[in-house]
Image (cartoon, rainbow, N blue to C red):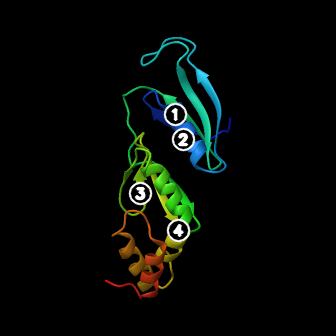
Amino acid sequence: MAKNVICLWYDGTAEDAAKFYAQTFPDSAVTAVHRAPSDYPDGKQEQVLTVEFTVLGVPCLGLNGGPAFEHSEAFSFQIVTDNQAETDRYWSAIVNNGGTESACGWCKDRWGLSWQITPRTLLDATTDPDRAAAKRAFEAMMKMKKINIAAIEAARRGTARA
């Protein structure tokens, strides 16, 4: 196991979540499933306690800790995409499998974990040295749920329709 691992708390669904992430994102896998050696406050001996997995190469541990804590927007995975097709694919995978849309490229999966599906074009546009172009792109993004790359590029150029 890596020295630095993201630990995500689940209410008994860590293995399902890890399998979904492994099926959805490249360079992702479920690498180990560990069962509880004895009963614990929110589970029984031999139930899945932790799941080791990777998301786009990032090592994670899913902990079935029970209902005490829920995910919040204070933590999210930011997935940087290279084109609209990739953006659409990841967005749809999350939202269309029990997830929910949010604003500015954010969505939540069915386990309540937040994801930022962020086209590289958006990052380039909002950090453009031409601050007027960056402002136009940023203001366009603020009106979106899923990011529309063509609309961001048009806003950056100043050719977007109001």
As displayed, is residue 73 above or below residue 42?
below
For marks 4 and 2, the one nearer the N-term is 2
Look at the numbered disc 1 and give the secondary structure of its residue: helix
Residue 22 is situated, as x and y percent measured from the top left of the image, at: 60, 43
Q: What residue is shown at x 56% (from left), y 44% (from top)?
A: 21
Q: What residue is shown at x 49% (from left), y 12% (from top)?
A: 39
**Which amino acid, mark 4?**
Gln
- Which residue extends farthest left? 162
Asked if disc 1 and disc 2 are in contact, CB closer than 8 Å, the reply is yes
For marks 4 and 3, the one nearer the N-term is 4
For marks 1 and 3, the one nearer the N-term is 1
The residue beneath circle 4 is 84
Q: Nearer the viewer, mark 1 or mark 3?
A: 1
**Which amino acid, mark 3?**
Trp
Instruction: Please tell me the numbered disc located at residue 16.
Output: 1
The residue beneath circle 2 is 20
